[in-house]
Image (tube, rainbow, N blue to C red):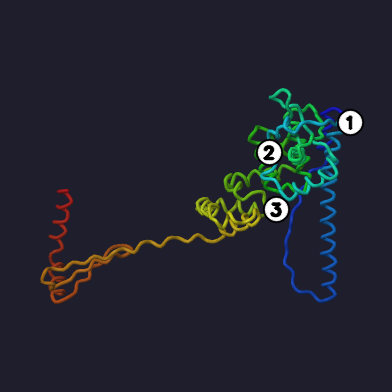
Amino acid sequence: MSRKNLLSSLTERKLTTVNSMSSQTLPLPPSQERLRNRGAFGAITRSIDELAERAQQANEIEARLLEGASIIELDPDAIDASFIADRMDDDEIAFNELLEAIREHGQASPILVRPHPGINGRYMIVFGHRRHRVAKTLERKVRAVVREMEDREHVIAQGQENSARTDLSFIEKAVFASSLEKQGYDREVIMQALSVDKTVVSKMLSVLNDIPADVVNAIGAARNSGRDRWYKLAIKFRETGALKSGAELVRSDEFKSLDSDSRLELLTSHLDKPAVKPRPKAAISKSWAPQDNSVSVTFKPRPKGISLEITKTDAKPFADWISGNLDGLYEAYRKSKQEK
C-alpha cells in the first residue's frame, strides 16, 4: 500500500465531536430510583465500551501504518524523540504498568520510526515513545518498523495514533494543535492529525491564545478535565487583572502542592471571585491656630472641594473678617502664583 493511500485511509473516518453534559438530580421515588440506578449502571457500561472502542481504534491505526512492513530490533540509543511533542508530561503509573507488562511478556507491538531527516544512521519516533522508554529502562532492543515519511505524514500519523488513545487529555491535544500551527501546518493537517473538525480546532487554539503558556505548563495535563473546564478558564483570562492574579496564585505553595486537575480547578475558582478594589486613601485634614490659640481653623477635604471649620473664642469675628476680605485674599493668592 502506498504512503498516500495509507494515510488517506486513516482520514476517511468521519470527523465528530463529543459534548459532555452535567446535570443535578432531585430525590426520586423508590421505583424511579431503581430505574435511575439501572441508567447509571448502563452509563458505566457505555463508558467502558467507549474506552474499549478507542483502544481498538488506536490498534487499528497502528496496524494500518505497520501493515506489510518488516519488524526489526533497534538500539534505543539510536532513536530520537519526535520533532513535535504530543504529551505535556508522562503518566508514571501507566508507564510503570507498561514496563512490568513488557518485562514479563515482552514487547507485543512494535513502535513506528522513520530515518532521521537530519542525522544519518539515526531514527526518529513517529509513535511509541513509552515503549521506547521502557526498552531503554530495561536495557533491551526495541521492536520497531522503519518507514520513510515526510514531516506532514509524520505528524498526521503521530497525531491520529495518540489522539485515538484515552490518556491524551484535551489540553495536550490543544498544545499539539498549537505546535503544529506554529510550525506552519494548515488547519486541514491539524484536523486530520487529531480527527476533529474545524470548529474544535478553532476552540483548541483559542484556549491557548487566551491562557498564557507558562500557566498551561504550570497546571499540566489535567487528564481528568475536559474542554469545558479549560474554556471556562480561558474566558476568565480575558478579564482585566486576571493575568496578574493568576500569576500570583500559580507561584503559591498551595497551587504547587496540588495535582494537575486540582490546580486547574483552584485557578478557575480563584479567578471566579470578584476582584477586590482597593479603597481610596482617606484625605488628611489640616488645622491651623495662632500662638494665643484664640481661634482654630480646620481644612477638611471633600469629594468635590474643601471646607473650613472655624472654632474657639474668635471664631465668629474671624469668619466675618475673612468674608469681608475675600477679594483681597484672592488677589494676594493670584499674585503669589505669578511670582512662582
Q: Which amino acid type is marked by label 1? A: Gly
The residue most toward the front is 139
Q: Where is residue 142 drawn, in percent x and y?
A: 79, 35
Q: Earlier in the sequence, mark 2 or mark 3?
A: 2
Give the structural element (helix, strand or loop) at label 1. Answer: loop
Q: Nearer the viewer, residue 290 or 91?
A: 91
Q: Where is residue 329 drawn, in percent x and y?
A: 14, 60
Q: Nearer the viewer, residue 102 or 155?
A: 102
Q: Are marks 2 and 3 in contact (CB under 8 Å)?
A: no
Q: Nearer the viewer, residue 282 or 98?
A: 98
The residue under label 1 is 68
Disc 2 from disc 3: Cα separation: 20 Å
Disc 2 from disc 1: Cα separation: 27 Å
The residue under label 2 is 85
Give the structural element (helix, strand or loop) at label 2. Answer: loop
Mark 1 against mark 3, which lies toward the viewer?
1
Q: Report the side of 64 relative to 156 (left or right).
A: right
Neighbor class of circle 2 (other Cα within 10 Å; few <14, some 14-19, many 20+) is some
The residue under label 3 is 226
Q: Report the side of 273 relative to 279 (left or right).
A: right
Q: Earlier in the sequence, mark 1 or mark 3?
A: 1
**82 vs 296: above or below:** above
Neighbor class of circle 1 (other Cα within 10 Å; few <14, some 14-19, many 20+) is few
Q: Where is residue 178 drawn, in percent x and y?
A: 65, 40
Q: Quadrant of residue 7?
A: top right
Q: Is residue 278 visible?
A: yes
Q: Which amino acid type is marked by label 2? A: Ala
